[in-house]
Image (spheres, rainbow, N blue to C red):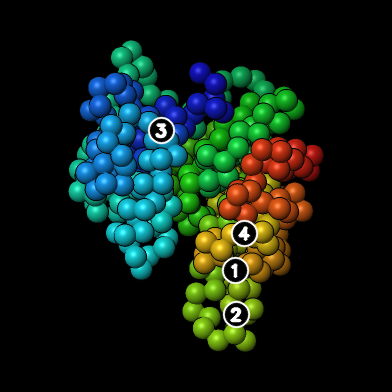
């Protein structure tokens, strides 16, 4: 199984312990319609958020969109829950038992998210948010690194921010420490900037508030890097927010990226890659560059090595 392309899709051991359903996952036996993804889809169908016969057991774009709509209704005052990822809070609201977990495919052995090395090549690990998880950037970056001779492992969680890696996902950091990667690429920061302007009601306070949040967010990212202690760590800074859509601007202040970069190089990070030039223009939402933009961003990151 290709480690970089299929790692998240069939990562059943993490699925069992973390109880998170997200884009890219699928039931071991989708045709049975008894797996957890199918059960989730059946709940969404009952709520008329998915059309009939949508329980195919694959967490695709339509399922993610339906989950997002449900989260908007279930958590009207908490936009942090609007990520299209089914975690503990969303499971509770849906009334799905937290003990539900996918059955193993016949003869299959679960693969830990960050299993041990499989070759003598230098190891590069990419961790982060949706840019690593379901955006084409994570896949393109893995390809670029493999072409440079690295064994690559990547693990992204859509909608995640540095605090989640330091607390709920600390188990993954322990696995990373055991791996002792030669190169760690941290693609965090975009979601850390969400609500950076929270509490800054007065216009004159917003700039100060953003810079305070920028320093706090950069420090958290440095803490993630410091926990892993790879031979070399690159922080892939957040993309440009200048082209973000109206919907995205509800979450991200256009100056938030500038503020987090202004905080300087976090402790524990060897190289800060400024993603703003490479992502100027953005994707459909102005946040996730895809296609040629995503490939150009990945190539620029690798050239900075």
Among numbered discs 2 and 3, the one appearing first in the sequence: 3
Tag 2 and tag 3, C-beta contact below 8 Å: no
Tag 2 and tag 1, C-beta contact below 8 Å: yes
Among numbered discs 3 and 1, the one appearing first in the sequence: 3
Category of crowding for the residue at label 1, using alpha-carbon neighbours closer than 10 angstroms: few (below 14), some (14–19), many (at least 20): many
- Which residue is painted at 50% across and 55% down in the image? 161
Among numbered discs 4 and 1, the one appearing first in the sequence: 4
Specify the quadrant that holds the C terminus: top right
Q: Which residue is mark 4?
A: 244
Position of residue 244 relative to residue 47, above or below, is below
Kindly state the secondary structure of the residue where label 4 is placed: loop
Estimate the x, y position of residue 76 in percent, counting from the top left. Answer: 34, 65
Kindly state the secondary structure of the residue where label 2 is placed: helix
Estimate the x, y position of residue 221 in percent, counting from the top left. Answer: 58, 56
Kindly state the secondary structure of the residue where label 3 is placed: loop
Disc 2 to disc 3, how far (Cα)? 39 Å
Frontmost residue, 232 versus 286: 286
Q: Which residue is mark 3?
A: 25
Tag 4 and tag 1, C-beta contact below 8 Å: no
The answer, for residue 239, to whether it is visible in the render is yes
Quadrant hosting residue 295: top right
């Amino acid at each position: 199984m290709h480690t970089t392309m299929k790692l998240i899709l069939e990562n059943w051991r993490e699925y069992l312990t973390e109880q998170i359903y997200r884009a890219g996952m699928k039931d071991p036996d989708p045709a049975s319609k008894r797996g957890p993804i199918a059960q989730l889809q059946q709940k969404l169908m009952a709520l008329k958020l998915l059309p009939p016969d949508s329980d195919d057991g694959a967490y695709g774009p339509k399922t993610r969109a339906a989950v997002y709509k449900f989260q908007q209704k279930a958590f009207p005052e908490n936009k942090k829950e609007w990520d299209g990822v089914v975690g503990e809070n969303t499971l509770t609201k849906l009334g799905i038992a937290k003990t539900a977990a996918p059955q193993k495919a016949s003869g299959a052995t679960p693969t830990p998210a960050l299993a041990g090395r499989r070759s003598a090549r230098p190891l590069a690990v990419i961790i982060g948010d949706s840019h690593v998880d379901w955006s084409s950037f994570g896949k393109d970056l893995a390809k670029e690194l493999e072409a440079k001779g690295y064994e690559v492992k990547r693990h992204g969680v859509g909608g995640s921010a540095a605090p989640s890696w330091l607390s709920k996902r600390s188990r993954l950091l322990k696995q990373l420490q055991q791996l002792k990667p030669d190169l760690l690429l941290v693609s965090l920061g975009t979601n850390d900037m969400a609500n950076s302007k929270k509490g800054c009601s007065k216009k004159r306070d917003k700039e100060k508030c953003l810079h305070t949040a920028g320093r706090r967010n950069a420090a958290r990212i440095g803490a993630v890097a410091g926990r892993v202690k790879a031979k070399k760590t690159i922080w892939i800074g957040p993309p440009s927010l200048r082209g973000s859509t109206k919907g995205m601007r509800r979450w991200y202040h256009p100056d938030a990226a500038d503020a987090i970069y202004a905080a300087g190089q976090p402790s524990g990070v060897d190289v800060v890659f400024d993603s703003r030039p490479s992502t100027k223009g953005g994707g459909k939402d102005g946040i996730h560059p895809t296609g040629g933009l995503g490939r150009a961003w990945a190539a620029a990151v690798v050239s900075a090595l």
